[in-house]
Amino acid sequence: MKISEEEVQYVAKLANLELTPEEVKTFTHQLSSILEHMETLNEVSTDDVEPMTRIPDFGELASSSTPFREDVPGPTIGTERALGNAPDPGQKYFRVPKVIADR
């Protein structure tokens, strides 16, 4: 499936992105390639594949250990340090410009 430059521009507008003409061409090619690959995958027969009812636990797949560390609480960096590099910090929060326009 090919995607048009107009469709890329439409999606960019929905995402509030400004793309250069070169970026539009690049993304058009890349997204078309992804969609063509998905069409190829849709041709693969999955008749003999049992549906998954849940995501497997890593313990079931790994031989003896998982790649994750234990989730142990630790010290925090504190509000002052967290806001230290913010361009416009509030009292205890990050202040950001409004990104959603009134309709």
Image: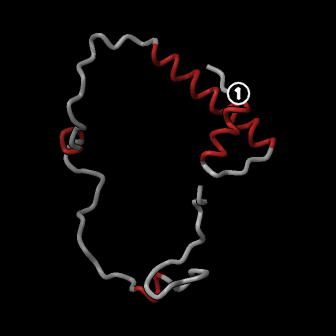
* Residue at x 33%, y 14% (from the top left corner): 46
* Residue at x 50%, y 85% (from the top left corner): 90
Quadrant location of the C terminus in the rendered image = bottom right
Question: Percent x, y for residue 59?
Answer: 19, 44
Quadrant location of the N terminus in the rendered image = top right
Q: Helix, strand or loop at disc 1?
A: loop
Residue type, mark 1 in image = Ser
Q: Which residue is disc 1 drawn over?
A: 4
Question: Percent x, y for residue 64?
Answer: 19, 47
Question: Percent x, y for residue 29?
Answer: 70, 30
Specify few, some or many for label 1: CA neighbours under 10 Å numbering under 14, 14-19, or 20 or more. Answer: some
Q: Work out whether 89 lies above or below 30.
A: below
**Residue 42 falls in image quadrant:** top left
* Residue at x 24%, y 28% (from the top left corner): 52
Residue located farthest toward the right when viewing the structure as drawn? 21
**Residue 11 falls in image quadrant:** top right
**Residue 74 falls in image quadrant:** bottom left
Q: Work out whether 67 lies above or below 3.
A: below
The answer to whether residue 11 is left or right of residue 55 is: right
Front residue of 53/48: it is: 53
The answer to whether residue 77 is left or right of residue 24 is: left
Q: Work out whether 71 lies above or below 38.
A: below
* Residue at x 24%, y 65% (from the top left corner): 71
Q: Work out whether 29 lies above or below 49.
A: below
Question: Percent x, y for residue 35?
Answer: 57, 25
